[in-house]
Every structure is written in structure tokens, then in C-alpha cells.
């Protein structure tokens, strides 16, 4: 403790030594009696010792307060430098608490997603198991369940990438029609199985990330199929944007403002037990990264129009 005190107040000791040197030089130049010099040195040394004892007592209290910092001990840290350090620590503490809260929120969201994801995965797995047990493995039905499993897995992995800021966006000029055609081919079994017609009109060249754009469009197209009517239709128009229109159930007006909220399923999702509440949320986040915007217009029992366009 004494060594720390000496390092803390070494400038004071240096000033005293300079003062002593000044005394000696002054007495030497004026050839004053050495008795006066001894008395001056003794007097200054006495003041230094008393002053140092007081400083040491306060220094010791401050060091103990810092080692076992409590609200009661904060009153001992009253020096301007102490107050400045305490302010810095307070700011750091607030930032750390905010980061901790954000981390806990992400963990809770991830746990909720994994629970929901595992529940959703059980449905196609149970369907495949039942097909196997009853020896009723039709290729179209198997492909449909495998596609659902693939979509759920993609949602989980992409959610983790976006949450951890680990997404790998690579921008290039993309013919959006090619992306749309590949997606329609991917979902062709569902189009055929439910007798839903599909039409693609126009084209759009866009500098974007092909993989992430395909993922965002797949979520919209999946919903257009999921909530469509048997014998319905899906129209995809490309002209300085993408408009995906369906003749499905439609969306309640009060649900539209919250469609892209994390975990929101809406009336249709709850009624038909088909939604996880993360598909459109991820779509919105991905499109934002791609500098694209999305707008939804819908009428119940008439259909839904989803427009994706370049942000201003």
C-alpha cells in the first residue's frame, strides 16, 4: 500500500526535494548560519510528514473503497478524477446492461424459434412416417413433405445467419425472371397437386444477391400457395419490381400492419395451423439488406398482392 502511495504522490516528493535543494542553494549563496538551514529543513519535513499522513489515510480509504466498491463507499471517491472515472464506469455499465439485455432477448427469441421450428418439423416427419408405415409412399406426397422440411430448415439457418450478422451478401446483376422460374419449378408439385395455375409476365434486371433474393421470394410464393384455394391461380408480374398475386383466403385488414413482426402469425396462420411467424419477418429483413421494400395489399376471400420494389 505504501509503495502505491509513493507512486501516486511521487510528484509531491519531487517538489519537496526541489524545495530542499532551493533552501540549501539559498543558504549557501547568502552564507546564512547552518542553524537556520536545519530549522527550515526540520520545519518543512514536519509539515511534509503530517501532510503525507493525512494524504495516506485518505488514499488508503479510497483504495479500499475501490477494492470493495459499494454504494456507501462511493462518497469517499470525491476527487474530480475519481468522479470522471465513475462517470466512465457508469456509462460502460449502462452499455453492458443494454448489450446483455439484447443478448438475452436474442436468446429468448432463438429458443422460441427452435421450439416452434421443432414443432413444425414434426408435422412433415409424422406424415412421412405414416406413409412409410402404411406403405403409401406416393412420390408427389413425399416430395411435398421434403419441401416443407427444406423450407423449415432454411428458415432456421437464415434466421441464425441474420441474427449473428453472418450473412454473406454478394451483389451481381440478376435476371429476376430466372430466379422466379427456378422457384416455380421447385414448387411445381404443389401447383399440380392443388391444381393452381401460375403465370409469369415480364422481366426485371436487378443488382442484388441471387441466393438471398431467391429465399425472400420463396417465402412469399410459399404463402401464395399455402393460403390459396384449390383450383386458384398465382400471377407473377415483373416490371421494375415484382408483384405476386394470388386468389387465396386474403388477409384481415387489422393483420396487415403486423405481417412482418417477428413471430406474428395472424388469423390465417392460427386458423389453419400453417404459420411459424418467421417467414415474412425474415423476408422483410433480407429485403432491407438488399435495399428492397415490400408492400402488401389484400382482400378477404379475394386474394393478396405482394409487391417488392427498389427502395427510394
Image (spheres, rainbow, N blue to C red):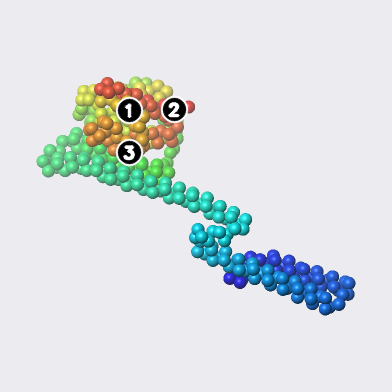
Can residue 45 be seen by looking at this rendering? yes
| Quarter occupied by residue 252 | top left
Residue at 52% across / 50% down in the picture? 91
Q: Secondary structure at mark 3?
A: loop
User: Extreme bottom residue here?
Assistant: 35
Residue under pointer 2: 310
Label pair 3/2, CB-CB below 8 angstroms: no
- Residue 54 quadrant: bottom right
3 or 2: mark nearer the eye: 3
Sequence-first disc among 3 and 2: 3
Image location of residue 138, percent across then percent down: 15, 36
* Residue position marked by numbered label 1 in the rendering: 254
Q: Residue at x 81, y 75 (%)?
A: 37
Residue density around tag 1, few if under 14, some if 14–19, many if 20 or more, within 10 Å: few
- Image mark for residue 263: 3
Is the residue 69 above or below the residue 286 in the image?
below
- Distance from disc 3 to disc 2, alpha carbons, whole Å, reads 26 Å
Question: Camera-side residue: 255 or 144?
Answer: 255
Image quadrant in which you'd find residue 294: top left
Circle 2 SS class: strand
Q: Position of residue 307 (x, y in %)?
A: 37, 25
The answer to whether residue 109 is left or right of residue 54 is left
Measured Cα–Cα span from mark 2 to mark 1? 26 Å
Identify the image quadrant of the N terminus: bottom right
Amino acid at each position: 500500500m505504501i509503495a502505491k502511495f509513493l507512486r501516486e504522490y511521487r510528484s509531491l516528493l519531487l517538489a519537496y526535494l526541489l524545495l530542499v535543494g532551493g533552501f540549501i542553494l539559498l543558504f549557501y549563496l547568502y552564507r546564512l548560519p547552518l542553524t537556520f538551514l536545519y530549522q527550515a529543513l526540520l520545519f518543512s519535513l514536519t509539515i511534509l510528514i503530517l501532510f503525507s499522513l493525512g494524504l495516506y489515510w485518505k488514499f488508503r480509504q479510497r483504495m479500499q473503497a475501490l477494492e470493495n466498491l459499494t454504494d456507501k463507499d462511493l462518497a469517499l471517491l470525491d476527487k474530480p478524477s475519481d468522479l470522471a472515472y465513475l462517470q466512465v464506469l457508469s456509462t460502460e455499465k449502462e452499455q453492458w446492461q443494454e448489450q446483455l439485455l439484447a443478448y438475452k432477448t436474442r436468446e429468448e427469441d432463438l429458443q422460441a424459434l427452435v421450439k416452434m421450428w421443432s414443432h413444425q418439423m414434426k408435422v412433415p416427419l409424422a406424415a412421412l412416417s405414416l406413409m412409410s408405415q402404411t406403405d403409401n409412399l406416393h412420390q408427389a406426397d413425399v416430395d411435398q413433405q421434403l419441401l416443407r422440411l427444406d423450407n423449415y430448415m432454411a428458415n432456421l439457418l437464415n434466421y441464425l445467419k441474420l441474427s449473428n450478422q453472418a450473412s454473406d451478401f454478394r451483389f451481381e446483376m440478376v435476371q429476376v425472371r430466372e430466379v422466379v422460374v427456378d422457384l416455380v419449378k421447385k414448387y411445381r408439385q404443389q401447383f399440380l397437386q392443388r391444381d393452381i395455375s401460375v403465370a409469369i409476365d415480364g422481366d426485371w434486371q436487378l443488382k442484388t444477391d441471387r441466393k438471398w433474393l431467391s429465399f425472400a421470394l420463396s417465402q412469399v410464393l410459399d404463402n401464395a400457395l399455402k393460403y390459396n384455394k384449390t383450383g386458384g391461380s398465382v400471377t407473377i408480374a415483373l416490371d421494375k419490381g415484382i408483384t405476386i398475386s394470388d386468389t387465396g383466403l386474403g388477409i384481415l385488414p387489422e393483420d396487415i400492419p403486423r405481417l412482418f413482426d417477428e413471430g406474428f402469425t395472424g388469423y390465417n396462420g392460427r386458423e389453419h395451423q400453417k404459420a411459424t411467424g418467421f417467414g415474412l419477418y425474415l423476408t422483410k429483413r433480407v429485403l432491407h439488406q438488399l435495399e428492397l421494400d415490400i408492400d402488401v395489399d389484400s382482400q378477404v376471400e379475394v386474394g393478396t398482392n405482394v409487391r417488392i420494389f427498389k427502395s427510394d
